[in-house]
Amino acid sequence: MTLPASFLLGSATAAYQIEGAAAEDGRGPSIWDTFSHTPGNTVNGDTGDVADDHYHRLESDLDLMAELGLEAYRFSISWSRVLPSGRGAVNEPGVDFYERLVDGLLARGIAPVATLYHWDLPQALQDDGGWLTRPTAEAFADYAALIGSRLGDRVHTWTTLNEPWCSAYLGHGSGAHAPGITGREEPLRAVHQLNRAHGLAVQALRLVVTGQLSVTHNLHVARPDGPTGEAARRKVLALANDAFLGPQLEGAYPDSVIETTADVTDWSFVRDGDLAEIHQPVDVLGVNYYATSRVRLWDGVGERQNADGHSPSSGSPWPGAEDVEFLPQPGPHTEMGWNIEPEGLHDLLVTLRDRFPDLPLMITENGGAFPDTDVADGTVRDADRIDYVRRHLVQVERAVDDGVDVRGYFLWSLFDNYEWAYGYAKRFGIVHVDYDTLDRTPKASARWYSELIRRRDLSA
């Protein structure tokens, strides 16, 4: 199986997970600085204060990307590094860092793909209500206009939001992510303001950038189990997929969303004109995919099973669907406990093609955390990661053969990095990072991926 020459092959990271320099050169605190420094929120109390120290190692990291032959690099911009208070005075050293990053990529023949928001809201905006309030969406549009005006002539693709499902439901429902709020209506309020932020940012970017515009979602693939499985599946897809795709791409919250959340909210926080703001055309839809789920409705007998990996005892990320059981999936699994089902990616791509036939797609994240314990001659021999990526790319190629317009694939992640509430306990990278010395060592998967990019041949 071969990949077309126009198909972009790259890798991805996120600012808080790799940059470090958390309190340097004028950067303001984000909600992840606050959350990670709160005892009990992360494994081992780990923070992103240093992370991979990418901020200080930019040139050598860019050289490594060039050595591996990446065709594109997806990174995120730290809002609080550019605007320490989320609005107002611009922090020029922060803008300069991203200027150097983008120019360095272009000088090495690598297409820059920039994400404006990967979960790190400036703490000053959180103090004013964060994603539960309307002004945050408007501040995001101003931030988009600013950074777009500085970099808009050089960035290949702009992504407004990365996985707003996580920001809304894990940040404001289960409390497993920053800002650590638990509630039922709160995640739905956050959904709406994130949707508004996306729409307003698209409008702002259209005025100042030349690259294509996008948004990235971790769309769920739920498999029904038993006689109540289909009802459970509809609830999951309503909250995870339709709550974003509906308003952003179709101009309305679908009935499935309203019905699922009827005992949670009346959606009165949606004002006249909001849906028109949100419903803005994009040039490509980003798709993050890792695993599937298997669901049914809880019958009220015994303890409700929950294998979704997102629902600590403090709260649920599923307002209106708390009766859904996420059943254990057959293996194999990654270190995250997520099942490995490459066919789910094909199914998702085809479903999106059928629903949005004129919208190109891009795989903006896909990868696996593995133990990485097979080390010889200073190299991590991560055959399980190579197998994971190859099998998923085969399914992407299969979707392309089925007529799905897929423009590229970004492997998560370029580096081992700070994995949010898991701290440094999980490694997704194709480049090993020694967290004591911060030395980088390409794993076997990095060399394999580099050769794949060169040959564009999945049989190798």
Image (cartoon, helix red, strand yellow):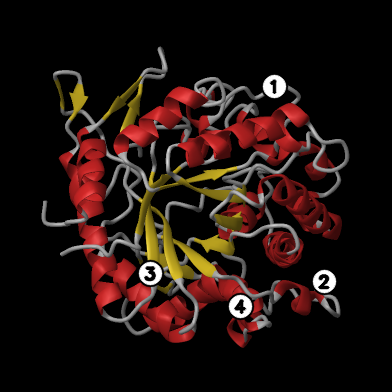
Q: Which tag is nearer the camera, tag 3 or tag 1?
A: 3
What amino acid is labelled 4 in the image?
Answer: Leu
105 shown above or below 215: above
**Residue under circle 2?**
269
**Residue under circle 4?**
249
Residue at 66% of width from left, 46% of height from top?
A: 151
What amino acid is labelled 2 in the image?
Answer: Phe
Separation of residues labelled 2 and 3 (CA atoms): 36 Å
Which tag, 1 or 4, sits closer to the chain's start?
1
Which tag, 3 or 1, sits closer to the chain's start?
1
Q: For this rendering, which residue is in front, 273 or 67? A: 67
Residues tagged 2 and 3 counted as in contact (Cβ below 8 A):
no
Residue at 37% of width from left, 73% of height from top?
A: 349
- Secondary structure beneath label 1: loop
**Residue under circle 3?**
406
Q: Which tag is nearer the camera, tag 4 or tag 3?
A: 3
Q: Which tag is nearer the camera, tag 2 or tag 3?
A: 3
Separation of residues labelled 2 and 1 (CA atoms): 36 Å
Which tag, 2 or 3, sits closer to the chain's start?
2
Which numbered circle lies on residue 223?
Answer: none
Q: What percent of the width, then of the height, locates residue 326? A: 40, 64
What amino acid is labelled 3 in the image?
Answer: Val
Residues tagged 2 and 1 counted as in contact (Cβ below 8 A):
no
Residues tagged 4 and 2 counted as in contact (Cβ below 8 A):
no
308 shown above or below 296: above
Decide: few, some or many residues near mark 3? Use Cα within 10 Å; few <14, some 14-19, many ≥20.
many
Separation of residues labelled 3 and 1 (CA atoms): 39 Å
**Residue under circle 1?**
23
Which tag, 2 or 1, sits closer to the chain's start?
1
Residue at 76% of width from left, 24% of height from top?
A: 26
Q: For this rendering, which residue is in front, 185 or 251? A: 251
